[in-house]
Image: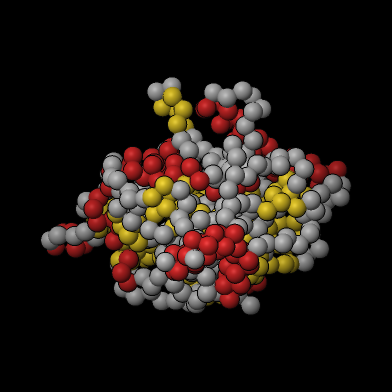
Amino acid sequence: MKKLLLLVLCGLSAVASAQTIPWEQSWARPVLIDTDMKMRTPAYHYLLLGTAFKEIESYIEEIQGKPKGSVKISADYIEYRFGYPYIYRNTFYTEDPQARVEFNDEVNEVIEKSKAGTLTKEDLKGPNWIHLVQALDTEEANCLAVSRKNNVSRGCADQWQDGGLTDDKLVCFKGKTYIKCHVECMEQIYKRKVETTPGPCADAEVNNEN
Amino acid sequence: MKTKLMLLSLLAVASYAQAAPTVRTWNNPECARGSCEIKGIKLYLDKYQKSSMAGTMMAAEIIGSNKGVLGNYAFVQHLKGCIFQEDSEGKRRLAMREYLGRSGVPFKHTEMEIDSASDKDPIYWSKPEFGYDEMRGFYIPRNASYMTKNPMGDGGGSWAGKPSNLTTPSIFVSDVPSFSTFSMNSDMSWVAQNSSLEFKICLHHVKDIPEKTEVGKLEVPNPIVCMNWSSNFVYNPKKFGFEERKEIHPYCLN
């Protein structure tokens, strides 16, 4: 019975998995929470990204030794670099940037709390709310973003490429889901083992049931 | 008309006044009396004045007796005055700003108020995500965004609360208030943006600074030392240039 309940709850929470970015057809609406716990859902169209983003793409291509024109920056990565601490695992897409986005229950619940001013970090648990590690200094930025040392490219760069934030790119740390590469940066820089479990955190409701 | 144009052109290429940066120093008298955690502070001011642009840039330095104490001290900056636009027809309009996390606020402070744009922490250049970081395994101080080197010199990254990031026991902040600007159209109409601002920057022990304020007119207790500075240039159409004012423009105080 518990197993059945687990399966039903997983379906209801609509656990996000691999996501291919429709680069040219749609407007991306990443769901972000800022440091004041306010929700933002900016609209991006990949064909309309400015030259600044093209420069970042060229920089990453050069650092990583990839062919010119092969890298495209995801809207999620752009927002991560702007400093947002939390992002919903999958981005919503619309054909019309003016259209109202049909978010799911999980996002709507957080929207309501954000509007009420009652949203806290503890509400952002489970597999779909990603806690982003922002660089404190240059040493961290070199690992979390992209850089080159001793002729070798390094850095986590855009983790939303290549099928999005799949389970193998995520880890669970103290009930919150993080990008595995970010955590590895922290372990490397601070020379300590961070106790994580592989994959995203279990659904918060499942945790409560068990 | 031709004479006026020639005169304006001459003024445009006239030499501009750009003073060398000045440095004001405060040495902590406690150090002479015995031990002290803070040796002093320095304020670096660089005025810039051309026919089309004028303003003052600031950098401030906290000098510790050792690197380990720097996480305990931070600046709180207050400001007074306004930024306003004026045109050749004499119309004036206040600029807008973000203030204490609220956007669309008129840029006008008739009294000294906390200078904080995007958040409610009175600390100047505060770090929102401060506290013990379980992943990193150390305490991120509220001044972790302060810089390792003088922004007016080589610059540097954030010190992040890590003494290993510092070559000397100093951390820095800077401020470049919106410059006063002037532009003229082909029909000789003009628009000037005037920044008439005074600042007071105070050094505090972090424990004396509340983590949040809803109130701009906050008196943070026990300032160790304060220094005043200003960026106060208003366009004078009769003189075809900016004048540095000693007092806030009356439009900012009404």
The tally of labels here is: 0
| Residue at the image point whose x is 64% and y is 35% from the top | A72
- The quadrant of the image that shows the C terminus of chain B is bottom right
The percent position of residue A28, horizontal first and vertical second, equals 69, 49
**For the view shown, which residue lies furthest in the left direction?**
B34
Q: In the rendered image of this protein, does residue A6 appear above or below residue A93? A: below
Residue A56 lies in what quarter of the image?
Answer: top right
Using residue A64 as the reference point, say whether residue B51 is left or right of it.
Answer: right
Using residue B63 as the reference point, say whether residue B97 is left or right of it.
Answer: right
| Residue at the image point whose x is 32% and y is 60% from the top | B132
Residue sitting nearer the eye, B47 or B217: B217
The percent position of residue B139, horizontal first and vertical second, equals 31, 57
Residue sitting nearer the eye, A91 or B239: A91
Using residue B185 as the reference point, say whether residue B254 is left or right of it.
Answer: left
For residue A12, say whether it is visible: yes
- In this figure, which colouring scheme has been used for the structure? secondary structure
Q: In the rendered image of this protein, does residue B140 appear above or below residue A110? A: above
The percent position of residue B194, horizontal first and vertical second, equals 65, 60
Residue sitting nearer the eye, B39 or B32: B39
The percent position of residue A60, horizontal first and vertical second, equals 56, 31
| Residue at the image point whose x is 75% and y is 53% from the top | A94
For residue A55, say whether it is visible: no
| Residue at the image point whose x is 59% and y is 36% from the top | A162
Using residue B138 as the reference point, say whether residue B108 is left or right of it.
Answer: right
